[in-house]
Image: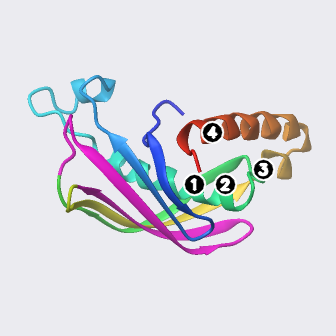
C-alpha cells in the first residue's frame, strides 16, 4: 500500500462500528499535482479512507484471519466538500453485516461538522492460499505486517 489514509483509530465497537482520523498535510506528495494552486485530497483518496476504516473493522472482528480485505463494490458515493491541508477528516463506518467472505458498511467522512464524503461499501475478504496453497507463507507475512500496523493505529 503506497498511501495510508488513516492516522489513528479513535473508537472501536468490535464488529459494529469504527471511527478513525486522517490529518491532511501539505507534505503529502499527491497534493503537488492535485492541484498546485488549490491542493485538496483527491476524492478517490477520501473514499479510500472509508475503505481502510472498514477493512480494519473486518480484520479486528475476524481476528486477522484473512490476509486480503478488498473493495468489491461501492454505491451511493456522495462528495460534498473538499479536504485541504491543515484539515482533519473523521471517518466513521458502521457494519451492516460481516460474514466469512464479505461484509457491507455505511461510511461517512466529516471535517468539523461538515460531511465531505459518504458511501455504501462491500468488501471481500480471503486468503491467497485459498486459490494457491503455495501462497500460505505470503498470507502469514501479510497478516503479521497488518498486526504490527494495527498496534500503531489503535491503542484500545
Q: Which residue is mark 1?
A: 55
Magenta region: 82-111
Residue sitting at x 46%, y 64%: 93
Q: Check contact, mark 1 vs mark 3: CB within 8 A.
A: no
Residue 127, numbered circle: 3
Q: Residues within 10 Å of mark 4 (few under 14, many from 20)?
A: few
Q: Nearer the viewer, mark 4 or mark 1?
A: 4
Q: Secondary structure at mark 1?
A: helix
45 on left or right of 122: left
Distance (Cα) linking label 2 and label 4: 13 Å
Distance (Cα) linking label 1 and label 2: 6 Å
Q: Nearer the viewer, mark 3 or mark 2?
A: 2
3 on left or right of 31: right
Q: Secondary structure at mark 4?
A: helix
Q: Check contact, mark 1 vs mark 2: CB within 8 A.
A: yes
Residue 9 horizontal/vertical position (percent): 49, 49
Q: Which residue is mark 4?
A: 151
Q: Residues within 10 Å of mark 1 (few under 14, many from 20)?
A: many
Using the image as rendered, state which of residue 41 and residue 12 is in the foreground: 12
Residue 151 horizontal/vertical position (percent): 63, 39
Q: Which residue is mark 2?
A: 59
Q: Main secondary structure of the magenta part?
A: strand
Q: Secondary structure at mark 3?
A: loop
Q: In the displayed structure, would residue 106 be above or below residue 69?
A: below
Check if residue 43 falls in the magenta segment.
Answer: no
The tag earlier along the polypeptide, 3 or 2, is: 2
Amino acid at each position: 500500500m503506497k498511501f495510508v489514509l488513516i492516522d489513528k483509530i479513535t473508537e472501536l465497537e468490535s464488529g459494529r462500528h469504527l471511527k478513525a482520523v486522517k490529518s491532511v498535510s501539505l507534505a503529502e506528495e499527491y497534493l503537488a499535482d492535485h492541484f498546485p494552486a488549490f491542493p485538496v485530497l483527491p476524492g478517490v483518496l477520501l473514499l479510500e479512507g472509508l475503505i481502510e476504516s472498514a477493512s480494519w473493522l473486518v480484520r479486528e472482528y475476524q481476528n486477522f484471519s484473512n490476509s486480503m480485505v478488498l473493495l468489491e463494490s461501492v454505491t451511493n458515493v456522495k462528495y460534498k466538500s473538499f479536504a485541504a491541508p491543515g484539515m482533519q477528516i473523521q471517518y466513521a463506518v458502521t457494519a451492516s453485516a460481516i460474514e466469512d467472505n464479505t461484509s457491507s458498511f455505511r461510511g461517512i467522512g466529516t471535517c468539523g461538522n461538515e460531511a465531505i464524503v459518504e458511501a455504501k461499501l462491500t468488501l471481500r475478504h480471503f486468503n491467497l492460499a485459498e486459490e494457491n496453497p503455495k501462497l500460505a507463507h505470503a498470507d502469514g507475512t501479510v497478516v503479521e505486517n497488518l498486526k504490527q500496523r494495527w498496534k500503531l493505529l489503535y491503542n484500545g
